[in-house]
Structures are given as C-alpha cells and as structure tokens.
Amino acid sequence: MLAYIARRIVYVVPIIISVALVCFLLVHITPGDPLVAVLPADASQELAAQLRAAYGFDRPLPVQFGLWLLRALHGDLGNSIATGRPVLAEVMRAVGNTVTLAIAAAIIGFTMGILLGLIAGYFRETWIDKLATSFAIAGVSVPHYWLGMLLVIIFSVELNWLPAVGAGPGGSGAWAWDWAHLKYLVLPAITTSVIPMGIVTRTVRALTGDILSQDFVEALRAKGLHERGVFRHVIKNAAPTALAVMGLQLGYMLGGSILIETVFSWPGSGFLLNSAIFQRDLPLLQGTILVLALFFVFLNLLVDIAQAAIDPRIKRG
Amino acid sequence: MSELPLSAMNEAALQAAPATKARGYWATVGRRILRDKVSMACALVLLLIFLSALLAPWLGLEDPYKGSMIRRLRHIATPGYPLGTDELGRDMLARLIYGGRLSLVIGILPVILAFGIGTSLGIIAGYVGGRLNTAIMRTVDVFYAFPSVLLAIAISGALGAGILNSIVALTIVFVPQITRVAESVTTGVRNMDFVEAARASGAGPFTIMRVHILGNVLGAIFVYATSLISVSMILAAGLSFLGLGTKPPEPEWGLMLNTLRTAIYVNPWVAALPGAMIFAVSICFNLLSDGLRSAMDIRN
C-alpha cells in the first residue's frame, strides 16, 4: 500500500510542473502587453521599461518560468495588478467560499445521485427507472447558469423566499453557519448539485445493474440471503468506482463554479477569476487557475489512494 | 519500392472487404435507431431548430436587430410579439430563431474540429506506440489536470473575448478527451489478426491506419463525440454568458441570457427563454447520443 502511494505521488510531480507551465504560458498567449492594466496611457518609454523589469517581463521566457516556479513554491504568486495585494491570499480567501459551496452541493448531489441510481438500477426497465434516468439526463443537459436564473425567478422574484445574490446579509465576507447565511447558500448549492446528481445517478445505476446480473448475486440469493444482504454486497462492489466518480465531480465543482458564482455573485474563486479576466489582471488570473488546478490534481490523487485502500484489486502497477 | 504495385493491389482488395461489411452493420444501426421513439423525437426537434435557424431570413420574422424604446420587455403572448420583446425592444421570437445560427455553430464546430484532430492524434498514438505514444498521451494527461470548464474559461479569458477565440478554447478542451478515447480503441484493435494480415500483405502504416484501423474505431469515437456536443453547447453559450464569446448586438442564446439577466425583476419568463433553447438542444443531443450508443451496441 505504501509503495503504491509513493508511486502515485512520484507520478504527480511531472503533472504539477506541466500544470504550472500551462498556467505560466496562459499569460504569454495573451495578446497585447500585460502591463496595459497598470500603465497610464501617456506613460513614457522609460517608465514602461522600468515596470517591465520590475515584473521581470524583460527576461527570456524559460528564465521567467524558472523564477516564477521558484517563487510559487515559496507561496509567492505575485501581487494582483488591480489591487496590489498578494495573489495567494486573495485566492485562498475566495477558495474557502467555493469549498463551502462545493461541499453543500456535493452533499445534495451525491445523496440524491446514489439513491436515484440504486433505485433505478434495482428496478431496471420499470417506470421508476425511466423516471430516475430522465431526471439524471435532465441534470447533465441543463445549462446550470440558466437553472440558477430559473431558481432565482421562482424563489426570489416570484415567491420572495430566498435571497437572489450574495453570500450573507449586509454583503459581509465572513461566513457563518446560521440560517441568516445558510439561506444564501440554498439556491447556488442546488444549482451546483444537478450535474453531479445526474452523473452519479447514471454511474450508480449502471454499476448496480451490472453487479445484480453477475453470478455471485444469484449464488447469494440461492443460498437464501435476504434482499437487504444482497444490497449490501451491491453497495460494497459499487463503492470504489462510485467513489472515484464522486471525487472527480467534487473537483469539477471546485474548478467549474465560475458560471454559477457569477449568476449568484457568490464571492468564490470563480467570481475572482471572472473579475481577473475582465480587469486583465494577469497575475491574479494565473494564480487562481494554478491554485484551482492544483486542488484538482490533489483531489484526484486522494481519490486514487482512497480507491486503492477500499479495493484490494487496485494495487497494481 | 519493387513491391509497390502489389501493395496497391492489396490495398484495393482490402479496401473493398471492410466496406461491404460496414454497410451491413450501419444499415442495422440505422434500422434500430429509426425504431427508437425517443431518438426520433429528439432528431425531429433538432431538425426543426436547425431548419428554422437556417431559413430564418425567409420566415417573415421581425428584424432581430431593430429595437424600439417604446416596446421594451413586452410579455409573452403580446399581440404581434408572440414571445415578447427583450430589454431593447427587439422581437424575442426572431432573436431566438436567428440566435440558433451562431449558437449552434459555436457549440458544434469545436466538437467537429476536435473530432478530426483528436481522432488523428489518437490513432497515430495508438498505432505507432512507443515514444510517440508517450509524448502524445502525457501531453493529453496535462490537460486532464484541469476541470474542463476552468480550462475553457482560462484559455478564452487569456485569448480575450470573441467568437473565434471561444471556438479555439473549446476545441482545445475537447481534443484531449477525444484523443484519449481514440487511442484506447486503437490500442484494442492494433494487434488483431486483420491488421496483422494487412501488414503481412505489405500495406504501409499509413494505409493500415487509414483503411483498417479508422474503419473499425470511427464508430466508437463518433458516438463519444456526439455525447460531447451537449457539453459544448452549454459551455459555448456559457462563455458568451460571461461576456467571453459573442459580442452584442449579435443574437446568440448565451449572450441574450446575459443581457436579459437584469430584466428578471421586470419580465422574468421572457428573460429565461434563451436558456430553454440551449436546454432543448443540449438534452436532445444527449438523448440522441444515448440512442445511437445503444443502437450500435451489438450485444443487446
């Protein structure tokens, strides 16, 4: 087991370096001068050159990458061009809000997905299965930003039950686990949960169907095991794959929340990314994407290790 | 070299063989999908949306660009404006139908481009193997380290707003996914007897890939690519929704959803219409792709 974990960790190192390279290069495929955002329109050539040297833009690209990577390893992702504050601090504060949203959505989406998937897989080809499957397909096909708008129209505009935007009363940044704050979380969390709900339903349904049609289930039933016991075996066999899918979905929720955060003005990493793009704040853009991608890589690593811990068949090369 | 005419002859002979077999297979698939009611209903809906977008100028609609300050945000079923008007007083029905033109192109084109590029890369990686495979597949792995929504937004955010940039960004998102599928099916086929036979009878690697591998893996890759169209439609409209794709006053569903967002307190149901179009196209492609997959599955 330890050897497997060590091998997986070693395998992640080149991925991390390549991810950093992609994030670094993103800034350099950008058309135009990255200094445009800070430089006054009538700046002299000398001032421009001075600033370029200060940000290190005058060095050759590989040198810039090396220096950037070295600083990033020390937790220094530079300063935001728009606010002048350190990028890492800004990103981590926003990521906290995104994690809150993703966990709330995961609880809703995974619970619903597992239940619907088990029921659909168990009652395959009945109307219950058809209903659950349609629900799942609608979940993965709906443009989630539109679903967010619909929920706002129904629950905020028409019924006036829940707030439409923001993450707390009075626009304060501090999050607290009380109803005053939680009611801001309800609509974005439901909106975020539909895609994982759909995908987990489809996965669990397929797994349940496959497992139930295997010989060992017949043997269990033949030896007189009650249905609840059979179900326990199904869950045990489906768990590793379902877990992997859910881990990946959690990663997608963390990294793909930008559209939903924009609809609900949820002050998370997606919202930060959005403002970085439109203020052409390249260090912030670079830093946010790097942090989110690294989260995703580590989550994948954790899922692989957890999967190997549950499923003894996986410890192969 | 000296065996050139022989290999050319073989090529002709071998080309003929899978072609006749393929016709039988595809005819079966076609028959099965024609019997599938859900798939046919979806195909009909998509056909309607496609045709109306294509024929929009001849349908006698209002000018989708012409606004009027005195008839802004009319409700659905207003006489003369069956689906109301938008925040600048433009006819919603006309804008939704015209909007299909750009929305469908920016949603589907990236998948078509990625299908071409990804299939070629995957087949080459899978057939040639060795170092080339390692180089291609490790590069693909790097893109898998990004959630696809994040990657699409990061690339189009860095490139800047614009239709072309959003198509490029989405193509980059889908190429790795299709490459991975193409490589995996090619690896499954490359050591089969008929490939060995083709190689033994003197066919070059290019011929083998083009004739023998491609014909046997294309179906699986195609089904996978159709399942991506739904995601691509949602993402393409999403980029426009963020302001990274289409620019006003162009009618496009994602952008319309964005500009109408401010109107949800005045006329919420008109504001929600463009999203319903994206949803309809996306769910129809998803169901059609599912139908195609089960029609092509010989086992059942």
Image (tube, coloured by chain):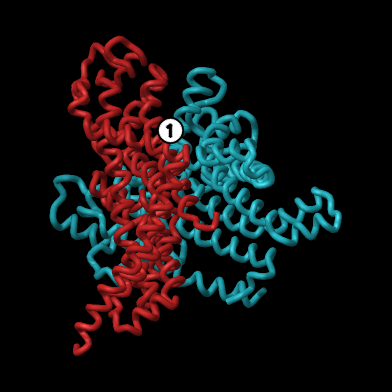
Chain colours: A cyan, B red
Q: Residue at x 31, y 43 (%)?
A: A278
Q: Position of residue A13 (x, y in %)?
A: 48, 71
Helix, strand or loop at label 1? It is helix
Residue A87 in view in this figure: no
Compared across the picture, whether B273 is left or right of B165 comes to right
Q: Position of residue B8 (x, y in %)?
A: 22, 78
Picture quarter containing residue B175? bottom left
Question: Can you say which quadrant of the picture contains the N terminus of chain A?
Answer: bottom right
Local crowd size for mark 1, using a 10 Å CA cut-off: few (<14), some (14–19), many (≥20): many
Q: Position of residue A190 (x, y in %)?
A: 55, 36
- For mark 1, name the chain: A
Q: Residue at x 62, y 50 (%)?
A: A204
Q: Position of residue A218 (x, y in %)?
A: 76, 57
A152 w.r.t. B119: above or below: above
Q: Residue at x 28, y 55 (%)?
A: B113
A86 w.r.t. A59: above or below: above
Q: Residue at x 43, y 62 (%)?
A: B181
Residue B290 in view in this figure: yes
**Which residue type carries mark 1?**
Trp
Nearest the eye: A51 or A60: A60
Nearest the eye: A205 or B294: B294
Nearest the eye: A113 or A23: A113
Most distant residue in the right direction: A224
Picture quarter containing residue A168? top right
User: How many numbered marks, from 0 up?
Assistant: 1
Compared across the picture, whether A304 is left or right of B36 comes to right
Most distant residue in the top direction: B79
* Residue underneath mark 1: A146
Compared across the picture, whether A65 is left or right of A234 comes to left
